[in-house]
Each structure stands twice: as C-alpha cells, then as structure tokens.
Amino acid sequence: MLEKPVSSAVLERLPTYLNYLRSLPTEVVNISSASIARALSLGEVLVRKDLAAICDIGKPKVGYSVTDLICVIEKYLGYNRTDTAVIVGAGKLGRALLDYDGFSGYGMNLIAAFDVDPQSQGTAYSGKPVMPLSRLAAFCRENDIRIGILTVPVEQAQEVCDLMIDCGIRAIMNFAPVHLVTRKDVLIKNENIAISLALLAKRYSEQVAEETML
Amino acid sequence: MLEKPVSSAVLERLPTYLNYLRSLPTEVVNISSASIARALSLGEVLVRKDLAAICDIGKPKVGYSVTDLICVIEKYLGYNRTDTAVIVGAGKLGRALLDYDGFSGYGMNLIAAFDVDPQSQGTAYSGKPVMPLSRLAAFCRENDIRIGILTVPVEQAQEVCDLMIDCGIRAIMNFAPVHLVTRKDVLIKNENIAISLALLAKRYSEQVAEETML
C-alpha cells in the first residue's frame, strides 16, 4: 500500500504522539484522541485529523488501541526499519552525538565518525570508531551509507558537504551555521541550536511584551 | 514602533537570510531579492514577501542595502540584544553546548551549567562554570535568568523542568526525548536530534521511492 503523504507539520507532531504513547503505563489499553490532546495541550480536532491522516484504526467510543497506534506510527515514521548514518566531524558535538544512545529508538544507527584530525582518529566512542576522512568514500560504498551528519567548523562545511555527496550521501543533517549549496537531489536539514535558542528567546520576549500590554 | 507579527515559517527563514548576507564579501553593497532567492534555492516571491513582512527598505531596481538588511534582521530577531541562559545537565551534550562558541552571534549568552553529579561540579568549560543543582535558584534570581536548556536524562527531565520553572525560568529548550507537562505561561521547545534525523531519513526514502516510480 502506498502511504498517504502528510504535511510536514503533521510529520513533526507524530514523534510527540509516539513519545507520549510509549510513556503510558501498560494498564492503558485504549486511548481517545481527546485524552491524547489533553495530555499534550493540543486541540482535539487536530489530534484526530493527524491520526486519521496515517491510519483508520480509531473506533468510536473506544478510541485507539495503544499498542496498535504505537505500531502504526513507528511503521509510518520508518522506526521499525533501521537506517545507518555516519558523522563527519568528531569534535565535541560530533562525539556527544556518537555517545548518545537515543537514536536506536527512532530507527537510526550511527555507526562511525570521520575526522581530519589525526588526534581523534583511531579512538572510539560507545564502540563507534573515529576514522580518517580519507576512508569516508570506501566506508560509504561498503556500507551503502546515504545519510550523514555534518559537524565540522563553518570554514570546512561546504568542502566537506561536497565530499559527502561525492561519497554517495544524499541526506545531510547540517550543524554548521552556514547555508550549504548542493545538487537538487540532495536533502539538507539545517540544525542550528543557537538559532533555535534565539527564536525561543524571541518568543519569550514577545510573550512578556503581550502580558505587559494587557 | 510595534513589530508586525510574522508566521513561524518566516521567522525560521530569517536566520538563513542573515547567514547568507553575513557571508557575502564586503564588495557587495546592494542585493536584490532575486539574487538572495537564487543563492538559497528559494522562490523569489517568497523571499520578497518574507523581507517585506519585516521591513520596507527594499528599493526598486536597487534592491536592499546589505548592511541595512543585516541590521534589520538582527534587530528583528533580537540578536542585537543579549539574552542570558543556563544549561541544566552537564553531561556530554550539555558540555558540548557550553563549549560551543556560536551562540553569541545570535545574541545568546550561556553563562553556566548545573548538575547533580559532584564529579562535574567545580569544573568549567570555555570559562563557564558547572555548579551544583542546589545553586540554581539563587543563581537565576541573582542573574534574572528566564531561559534554560535542559539536557538531563529522560528519567529526571520532568522533575528538573519543574525545578527550573520554580527558579523563574519561563522558556526551556528541551533535549530530553520526553513530553514535558508545564504551566501554560512556560514556553517549551523540544529539540530531539534523533527525531530530526529520523524525519530526514524518512524524507530521503520517500524521495527514492518517488524516483523509482518515475
């Protein structure tokens, strides 16, 4: 069956539903969209529409089977199939990500990191090796790697991005605060923690300004 | 003057424009929305509308003064005013964030971290101290801290979130993969790197599926 496409807003809420459903005690067998909405401070209609967009397992007056709904969302998000990815740039952030054990719960498996620094090469974090950048091409070919995380300094980001693409990587999560220029068939997701924090601070200051005006 | 509110989609594109404008050589005095659009692979109408939503400094046939536009966006995003923030949880991710020097470019200043682990207390990263969690309340009061980053394990996340709110923090960037329950006047921004990566992998696999069908 071909999956129905959903908007990116829905796609980004699905993991929130999943986290919440996973956190429920096993005693909870069924749950209504109203209960999910209340727990997550979301609108009930929104929750019902989101879930209806990916499945039709909700039953009137009963709601959703929690285990079935978890299963449906996991399958929809691809968490039941494992994707492998590599990190390029084994600085502090890269190493923190290598050590982070939360990826597997979302069907992701980070298997290695690459760096130009001879000091970090040959080391391993949580059993995942750091290898010389010159090994990237062969490693990606041998392991059919299509997904990469870029955690190098701004100055090297474009060059390293080009190299990753040459090595067959087609989806890049970019932590360098710079706009990367790539081919159209390459997906880039910019993750800028400083920008996220600044946007949060801006929203907070707007909220304070609104309260002051009331 | 009261700022016009813009959609969150516009708000999230503004830093991209800013990064690009900051990266231009100083020889570039004026720039058109068409050039910005081309460089960032965005639609020209979109760029023009985005910029029109926050300013009216664009001139027909001339475009925007680069320095003026940088200034307008920085001001709009609040980067010209510095907000201070703290980190709670000085594990690997928390320490990587303490060491990261990219926050100041976005008007954010992380000044300290807090942890329950006696081992990490008394240490410092890039000159920023790690203090006992019991010091959080006094520190937030003395420094008027309203913004916090939460990087503790899932099991402690809710309890630590409650404590941060008790200490006066009103905007929290949450890296723990769990839904936090809070008061309505507290802003929570969930940052789950594993989820972001999984969504990127999903988009990549959809793109491959589409290409296969063509």
Image (cartoon, coloured by chain):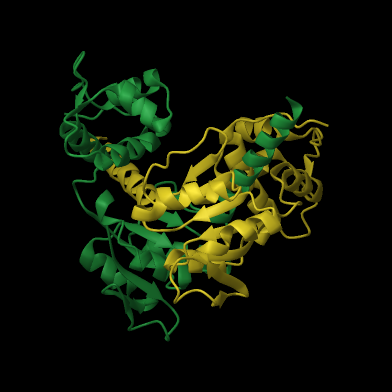
Chain colours: A yellow, B green
Q: Which of B123 and A139 is in front in this view?
A: A139
Query: Residue B121's quadrant in the figure?
Result: bottom left
What is the x, y in percent for residue A186?
55, 39
Query: Is B55 displayed left or right of A185 in the figure?
Result: left
- Examine the rendering and report whether any part of residue A126 can be seen: yes
Q: Quadrant of the C terminus of chain B?
A: top right
Query: Residue B143's quadrant in the figure?
Result: bottom left
x 68%, y 40%: residue: B205
x 21%, y 39%: residue: B25
Is residue B141 depicted above or below B125 in this figure?
A: above
What is the x, y in percent for residue B199?
61, 44
Is residue A132 depicted above or below A33 in this figure?
A: below
What is the x, y in percent for residue A71?
78, 48
Q: Going by the picture, which residue comes out furthest to the top?
A: B60
| Numbered circles on residues, count | 0
- Examine the rendering and report whether any part of residue A37 can be seen: no
Q: Which of A53 and B208 is in front in this view?
A: B208
Q: Going by the picture, which residue comes out furthest to the bottom?
A: B119
What is the x, y in percent for residue B68?
16, 32
Q: Quadrant of the N terminus of chain B?
A: top left
Query: Is B105 displayed left or right of A116 in the figure?
Result: left
x 55%, y 70%: residue: A130
Query: Is A10 displayed left or right of B51 in the figure?
Result: right
x 34%, y 68%: residue: B99
